[in-house]
Image: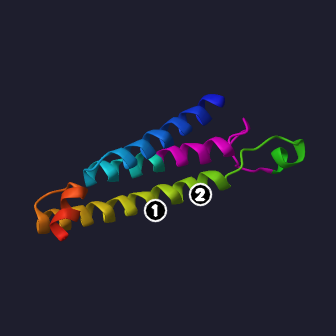
Amino acid sequence: MLVNYIGSAVLIAIGLVTILTKKELIKIVIGMGIIDYGINLLLVSFGFNGGTAPIFSFTELTSGAYFVDPVPQALTLTSIVIGACVDAMALALVVMLYRKYKTTDASEIRRLKG
């Protein structure tokens, strides 16, 4: 269980380092995606308790069985969809900038914009 938290922290750290150190816009978008994957892993790890699937029947409700909370899984699915849309929009902006400035280097675009 601790491995999931460590893995998500490593993914978030790799994404932050990528965003802060790279100048290519596509690499920055990839770093944003890596942060998104780390946050999704963290959300799923928070919701894991070691129970069974949350499919309820009358006998399971009266027996006191432990169930996994489905809310973090639903939030993670929503986060995956939103993250994919954000990545697509960011890549579309990178393509537009490339068509205008013929480069994806952020410092070069700032210099050309003047």
* Residue assigned mark 1: 82
**Left or right position of 16 against 69:** left
Q: Residue at x 39, y 62 (%)?
A: 86
**Left or right position of 49 against 4:** right
Q: Residues within 10 Å of mark 1 (few under 14, many from 20)?
A: few
**Coordinates of residue 110 in the picture (x, y in percent):** 23, 64
- 110 vs 23: above or below: below
Mark 2–mark 1 contact, CB under 8 Å? Answer: no
Q: Residue at x 58, y 32 (%)?
A: 6
Q: Residue at x 75, y 51 (%)?
A: 56
**Coordinates of residue 77 in the picture (x, y in percent):** 52, 55
Q: In the structure shown, which secondary structural element does the residue marked by tag 2 occupy? A: helix
State the quadrant of the N terminus. top right
State the quadrant of the C terminus. bottom left
Total label count?
2
Q: CA distance from mark 2 to mark 1?
A: 10 Å
Q: Which residues are magenta?
A: 37-57
Most foreground residue, 23 or 46: 23
Q: Residues within 10 Å of mark 2 (few under 14, many from 20)?
A: few
Dot placed on the residue nearer the N-terminal end, 2 or 1: 2
**Coordinates of residue 84 in the picture (x, y in percent):** 39, 58
* Residue assigned mark 2: 75
Q: Amino acid at mark 2?
A: Leu
Q: In the structure shown, which secondary structural element does the residue marked by tag 1 occupy? A: helix
**Coordinates of residue 17 in the picture (x, y in percent):** 42, 42
The question of residue 45 being in magenta is answered with: yes
Q: Residue at x 64, y 52 (%)?
A: 72
